[in-house]
Image (cartoon, helix red, strand yellow):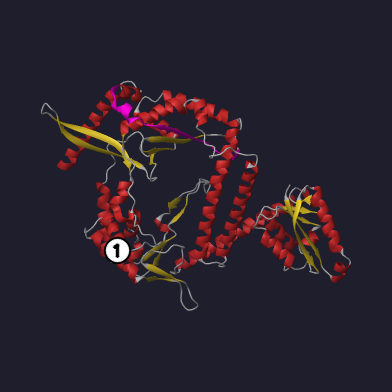
């Protein structure tokens, strides 16, 4: 049963007097009842000509298309929509774009073979018009840039204010003196070796200076980009980036931004904030800093996979050593390796008073590595145990889950149509840049929420169905075959990267997050699993517990030998650096 609305119209007072509109309404109500739908709204235009689209009831109907108040619209005939064919196409296009069913004289418009050609033409024309608008806008944009005129890109540059064009003056970047002082301070401190990037970040936060977006925290990446921005020396570059394309010239589905060749860049002169000499000094220091940076001497097994369960930051690996004096008087150097929360880097580059310290402890690398391998071997490779770890969204799916998924899909398509309308309005100059950005951000937030909810519901429905069992068994069988061949570090790391999305560590509580590919699921939605266990530190400290926890033949002896060799290499590398 669907919610339906009807639209009826008569043109003249004579038709109204003869009650022809009542016969239309009666016929439409009968069609709705036969179809098993429920009438929720009547839109009636009495004495309004079909030669014009400016009709009160029709305007009300078009305004309600973006809501969920009805799913289908019934018309007595096409001439009741409008007399002009182009006007008919406009109304029908709006109904189709908003995913409303169109029923004319009791027949579904989209399922009628006679209308297939009209639907194809409507879709092609709308696509062509949109592409033409975008191409015309881009061509005009590039033409103005080549003439040396500025165009707005929606995001301002710190230190400048964008002045819109007026009837007497073109658009321009004007120096914001208050922000320009901050820009000069950043360049002077860094270029003259007075402070590093992290120290500059802390000093700006202590002075309560906000970023371009009004935030309190100055991230290291923001400052590096500012130090490399040539706008501050009087040249603003446009047309520098594009979306990555395939070999046949089309854009990839999962595209990424890539830089164009510098010959395609377009330079526009703007007011200068810092001198060329100061800018060059900053670039030289950045270059030297990057040359000093070296890759880590040791790559640990779970690098890039562990996430802090308290603050959500990534865990990184760290190494240190301690000098211990034995009872025999012998001095021994003990090397340690652990995973720790990366919140320490934030504390180093930000004002500590504005941050909350993460209290999640570090964990020795060999303890967490071994625990993950045991969890994989005991649970992830066992289909029965893994099926118990499948996520169901925190509740059992009910009979209305499929309807909810369909409703979410309709809502998502409606938002996509709204985005196209926003782009068209922006291209025609009907809305400004600020409003365009705000509306797009709101749409992105809503679409992400709908996507997460749809994935959760689809996963729940699919997990409860019988299709999930085959996928889990196939996944476990393939994983077991690969796991058996994991005899060295590289093969183990590859196995982990292929089968695990992330590992959450929270005060000895370990959670493995992953997904099982499900080809027969709706829209190829993967089945997510969540394996949880806890590290028993008392068992690890005891000799018996240590042997049981390591679970790999000669693991501890092997680890000591490898780590001893690694430590020697590290010390040798450091000696060479000091000597060089």
Residues in magenta?
A: 522-543
Against 466, is 202 above or below? Answer: below
Please name whichever residue, 473 or 534, is drawn nearer the observer in this view of the structure. 534
Can I make out residue 524 in this image? no
Against 520, is 20 above or below? Answer: below
**Percent x, y of residue 421:** 60, 60
Against 40, is 339 above or below? Answer: above
Q: Residue at x 60, y 59 (%)?
A: 130
Q: Is residue 319 left or right of residue 53?
A: left
| Crowdedness near tag 1: few (<14), some (14–19) or many (≥20) residues, C-alpha within 10 Å | few
Q: Residue furthest front?
A: 538
Membership of 222 in magenta stretch: no
Please name whichever residue, 74 or 426, is drawn nearer the observer in this view of the structure. 74
Q: Quadrant of residue 459?
A: top right
Q: Residue furthest right?
A: 18
Q: Residue at x 34, y 57 (%)?
A: 218
Please name whichever residue, 556 or 280, is drawn nearer the observer in this view of the structure. 556
Q: Secondary structure at mark 1?
A: loop
Q: Residue at x 33, y 53 (%)?
A: 355
- Which part of the image, by quadrant, shows the C terminus? top left
Please name whichever residue, 210 or 233, is drawn nearer the observer in this view of the structure. 210
**Percent x, y of residue 63:** 67, 62
Q: Is residue 57 left or right of residue 233?
A: right
The residue pinned by badge 1 equals: 207
Can I make out residue 468 in this image? yes
**Percent x, y of residue 259:** 42, 53
Q: Is residue 12 left or right of residue 493?
A: right
């Amino acid at each position: 049963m669907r919610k339906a609305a009807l639209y009826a119209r008569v043109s003249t007072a004579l038709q109204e007097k003869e009650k022809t509109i009542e016969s239309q309404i009666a016929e439409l109500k009968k069609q709705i009842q036969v179809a098993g739908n429920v009438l929720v709204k009547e839109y009636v235009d009495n004495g309004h000509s079909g030669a014009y689209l400016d009709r009160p009831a029709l305007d009300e109907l078009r305004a309600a298309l973006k809501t969920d108040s009805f799913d289908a619209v019934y018309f007595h005939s096409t001439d009741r929509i409008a007399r002009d064919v182009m006007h008919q196409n406009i109304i029908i296009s709006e109904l189709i774009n908003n995913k409303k069913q169109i029923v004319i004289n009791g027949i579904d418009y989209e399922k009628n073979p006679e209308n297939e050609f009209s639907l194809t033409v409507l879709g092609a024309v709308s696509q062509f018009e949109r592409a033409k608008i975008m191409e015309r806008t881009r061509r005009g944009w590039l033409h103005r840039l080549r003439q040396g005129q500025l165009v707005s890109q929606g995001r301002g540059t710190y230190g400048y204010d964008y002045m819109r064009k007026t009837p007497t003056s073109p658009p321009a970047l004007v120096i914001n003196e208050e922000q320009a002082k901050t820009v000069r301070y950043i360049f002077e401190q860094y270029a003259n070796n007075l402070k590093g990037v992290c120290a500059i970040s802390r000093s700006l936060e202590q002075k309560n200076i906000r970023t371009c977006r009004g935030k309190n925290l100055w991230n290291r990446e923001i400052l590096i980009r500012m130090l490399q921005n040539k706008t501050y020396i009087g040249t603003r570059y446009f047309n520098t980036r594009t979306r990555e394309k395939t070999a046949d010239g089309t854009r990839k589905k999962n595209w990424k931004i890539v830089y164009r060749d510098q010959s395609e860049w377009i330079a526009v002169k703007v007011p200068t904030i810092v001198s060329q000499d100061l800018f060059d000094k900053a670039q030289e220091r950045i270059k030297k800093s990057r040359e000093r940076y070296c890759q880590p001497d040791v790559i640990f097994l779970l690098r890039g996979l562990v996430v802090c369960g308290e603050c959500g930051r990534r865990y990184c690996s760290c190494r240190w050593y301690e000098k211990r004096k034995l009872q025999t008087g012998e001095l021994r150097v003990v090397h340690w390796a652990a995973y720790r929360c990366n919140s320490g880097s934030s504390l180093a580059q930000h004002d500590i008073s504005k941050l909350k310290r993460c209290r999640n402890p570090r964990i020795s690398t060999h303890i967490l590595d071994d625990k993950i391998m045991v969890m994989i071997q005991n649970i992830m490779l066992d289909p029965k145990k893994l099926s118990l770890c499948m996520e169901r969204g925190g509740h059992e799916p009910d009979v209305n889950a499929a309807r909810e998924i369909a409703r979410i899909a309709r809502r998502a398509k409606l938002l996509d149509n709204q985005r196209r309308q926003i782009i068209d309005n922006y291209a025609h100059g009907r809305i400004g840049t600020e409003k365009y950005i705000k509306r797009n951000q709101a749409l992105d937030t809503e679409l992400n929420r709908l996507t997460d909810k749809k994935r959760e519901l689809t996963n729940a429905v699919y997990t409860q169905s019988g299709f999930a069992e085959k996928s889990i068994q196939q996944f476990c069988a393939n994983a077991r075959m690969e796991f058996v061949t994991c005899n060295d570090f590289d093969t183990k790391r590859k196995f982990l990267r292929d089968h695990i999305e992330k590992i959450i560590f929270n005060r000895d509580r370990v959670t493995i997050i992953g997904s099982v590919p499900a080809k027969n699921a709706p829209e190829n939605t993967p089945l997510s699993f969540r394996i949880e266990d806890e590290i028993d530190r008392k068992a690890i400290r005891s000799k018996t517990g240590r042997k049981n926890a390591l679970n790999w033949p000669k693991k501890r002896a092997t680890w000591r030998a490898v780590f001893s060799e690694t430590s020697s290499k590290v010390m040798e590398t450091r000696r060479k650096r000091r000597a060089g």
